[in-house]
Amino acid sequence: DTEVTQTPKHLVMGMTNKKSLKCEQHMGHRAMYWYKQKAKKPPELMFVYSYEKLSINESVPSRFSPECPNSSLLNLHLHALQPEDSALYLCASSPQGLAGSRETQYFGPGTRLLVL
Amino acid sequence: AQKVTQAQTEISVVEKEDVTLDCVYETRDTTYYLFWYKQPPSGELVFLIRRNSFDEQNEISGRYSWNFQKSTSSFNFTITASQVVDSAVYFCALSEATFRDRLAFGKGNQVVVIP
């Protein structure tokens, strides 16, 4: 089973709202990732958690706040977003993360976010 | 500098034709991994294949085949007898030992299969 689930599938929010994206995997993976993907572009890495600790933050604005409550769950808290933050947000997981380049990342279906 | 180049932006083929997607990569590492992912309109990135830098064997999986050539830094992907369900964006990606956890994606190939 290589399933990563994400909720909600679609989200519309105003610039003053606070919302959260959720990602879950039950493959026993210890690394989880958030990506942002704009239309007709490749995914861009935002955050990496490895063993529930934030290991990479790609200089993401503070209006995006990640959280990893346990090894199978990853959240992305959103606050005061801008219209240009509208995108597909993808979650991924891999077995360890620390093991480096040989791991395959498995992606979820994404959340399509529209900021008005 | 772009580490993964997928030159063809959009490719249209008629159903049952073969289509080859080119991927050229650049790295100084001797240990690296190459990946292909498929992204249908639904949005999910579906893992297709991983190949490490020490394994130049070509791979075939059903109608999909991959040709890895270190001499030309290429990892090309061929879909044989294309079907409408193959319509998607295909991404080639590179993972280097120096940049753990980071996948360098190419810009993607939009494949449109016309029935």
Image (tube, rainbow, N blue to C red):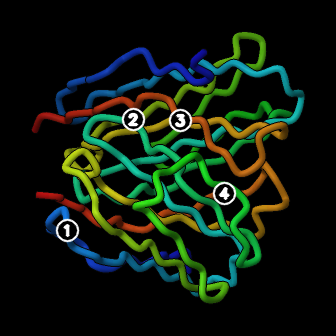
Can you tell which mark lies on residue A60?
Answer: none
Marks 2 & 4, CB-CB < 8 Å contact: no
Q: Quadrant of residue B89?
A: top left
Marks 4 & 1, CB-CB < 8 Å contact: no
Q: Helix or strand or loop: what does disc 4 sit on?
A: loop
Tags 3 and 1 both on a single chain: no
Observer-side mark, 2 or 4, equals 4
Name the residue type under label 3: Phe
Name the residue type under label 4: Thr
Instruction: List the single residue furthest toward the top.
Output: B72
Report the residue at 77% width, 19% height from top.
B70
Can you tell which mark lies on residue A16?
Answer: 1
Q: Position of residue B111 (x, y in %)?
A: 28, 33
Q: Chain of mark 1?
A: A
**Residue labelled with disc 2:** B80
Q: Chain of mark 2?
A: B
Marks 3 & 4, CB-CB < 8 Å contact: no
Report the residue at 77% width, 12% height from top.
B71
Observer-side mark, 2 or 3, equals 3
Q: Tell me how far mark 2 sits from mark 4, CA to CA.
A: 25 Å
Q: Tell me how far mark 2 sits from mark 3, CA to CA.
A: 24 Å
Can you tell which mark lies on residue A104?
Answer: 4
**Residue labelled with disc 3:** B105
Observer-side mark, 4 or 1, equals 1
Name the residue type under label 1: Thr
Q: Tell me how far mark 3 sits from mark 1, CA to CA.
A: 33 Å
Q: Tell me how far mark 4 sits from mark 1, CA to CA.
A: 37 Å
In the image shown, does A51 or B86 lie closer to the viewer? A51
Q: Chain of mark 3?
A: B
Q: Helix or strand or loop: what does disc 3 sit on?
A: strand
Q: Is residue B59 left or right of residue A23?
A: right
